[in-house]
């Protein structure tokens, strides 16, 4: 990974995203591009002066971080009518391979990363997006990968293994069975058994294939286990993040079953305002 873009609002709340971005850039030997989106001003002199002052502030901001000494960095203050569009355009210009944003725990997000902006960056961009909630204490140790058997969820697991090669991985598929008037009916029970058997077969194959592939890069292979759990997606993921002590949740966008179409609907608001941990979102490649 040669280039990583960190979009920051330069508040104290953005420290965690900065720390994680610097650690990942150091581990991946990447250039870190620090970007701050400014309000759009019609007066060119005001815009130019503010841009210069902000970039000077960003350079000073970097000096507060020890890891910045061993990472190649650039700073850019950008303007645009739409914050998300300015960030995406900059990502394109610097050939970014991942965008990092800050999440600020169980509180309403500040304007820069309000649900609509973060969602638009995910929706409209082509880049993986890492949203950082927690203060880094080292490399990611436990990664929960939401699996819907789509290429995007597969890509999310593989990218997370690149970002955290020494971590333990847990592949989880959340499923729901259609509810009939009487849950004890033979139709419901037969449907549940059929869904359970099919999904268990698929998760077993998914895990076996990923371990086999990982051994081509590393003889020991990745530490990956898989399971299927019945229940609503967010509830299952949030509970499993806690149970597995995961510090990173990897999900794919535009999945077959619809993790991300749902995620970018009502579930997005929950994940973005109440993130259970850091979240990596990876789009399916076209």
Image (tube, rainbow, N blue to C red):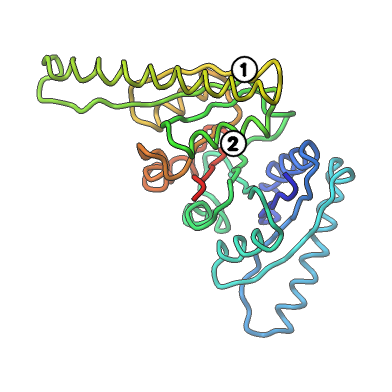
Going 62% across and 83% down the picture, which residue do you hit? 42
Secondary structure of residue under mark 1: strand
Going 54% across and 32% down the picture, which residue do you hit? 249
Q: Which mark is residue 8?
A: none
**Residue 178 falls in image quadrant:** top left
Residue 52 in percent (x, y) is at 80, 71
Secondary structure of residue under mark 2: strand
Residue 171 in percent (x, y) is at 50, 23
Q: Which residue is mark 1?
A: 223
Q: Quadrant of the N terminus?
A: top right
Q: In the rendered image of this protein, does residue 243 appear above or below residue 33?
A: above
Q: Which residue is mark 2?
A: 278
Q: In the rendered image of this protein, does residue 282 appear above or below residue 184?
A: below
Residue 252 versus residue 132: which sits nearer the camera? 252
Residue 191 versus residue 24: which sits nearer the camera? 191
- The CA span between labels 2 and 1 is 20 Å
Left/right of residue 243 with respect to residue 222 in the rendered view:
left
Residue 31 in percent (x, y) is at 79, 50
Q: In the rendered image of this protein, does residue 185 appear above or below residue 58?
A: above
Going 68% across and 68% down the picture, which residue do you hit? 78
Which callout, 2 or 1, points at the residue further toward the start of the chain?
A: 1
Left/right of residue 40 with respect to residue 28 in the rendered view:
left
Q: In the rendered image of this protein, does residue 29 appear above or below residue 122?
A: above
- Mark 1, Cα crowd under 10 Å, few <14 / some 14-19 / many 20+, is some
Residue 181 versus residue 258: which sits nearer the camera? 258
Left/right of residue 207 with respect to residue 28 in the rendered view:
left
Residue 211 in percent (x, y) is at 58, 20
């Amino acid at each position: 990974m040669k280039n990583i873009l960190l979009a920051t609002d330069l508040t104290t709340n953005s420290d965690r995203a900065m720390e994680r971005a610097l650690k990942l850039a150091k581990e991946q030997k990447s250039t870190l591009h620090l970007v701050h989106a400014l309000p759009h001003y019609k007066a060119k002199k005001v815009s130019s002066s503010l841009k210069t002052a902000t970039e000077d502030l960003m350079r000073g901001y970097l000096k507060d971080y020890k890891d910045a000494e061993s990472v190649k960095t650039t700073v850019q203050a950008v303007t645009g009518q739409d914050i998300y569009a300015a960030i995406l355009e900059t990502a394109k210009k610097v050939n970014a391979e991942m965008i990092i944003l800050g999440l600020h725990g169980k509180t309403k997000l500040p304007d820069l990363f309000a649900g609509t902006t973060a969602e638009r960056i995910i929706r409209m961009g082509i880049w993986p997006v890492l949203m950082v909630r927690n203060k880094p204490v080292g490399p990611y140790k436990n990664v929960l990968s939401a699996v819907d058997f789509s290429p995007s969820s597969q890509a999310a697991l593989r990218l997370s293994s690149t970002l955290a090669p020494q971590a333990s991985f847990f592949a989880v598929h959340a499923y729901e069975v259609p509810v009939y008037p009487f849950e004890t009916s033979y139709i419901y029970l037969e449907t549940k058994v059929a869904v359970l058997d099919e999904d268990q077969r698929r998760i077993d194959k998914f895990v076996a294939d990923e371990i086999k592939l990982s051994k081509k890069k590393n003889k020991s292979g990745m530490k990956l286990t898989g399971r299927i759990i019945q229940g609503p997606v967010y509830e299952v993921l949030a509970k499993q993040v806690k149970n597995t002590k995961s510090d990173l949740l990897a999900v794919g966008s535009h999945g077959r079953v619809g993790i991300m179409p749902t995620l970018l609907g009502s579930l997005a608001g929950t994940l973005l305002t109440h993130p259970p941990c850091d979240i990596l979102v990876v789009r399916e490649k076209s």
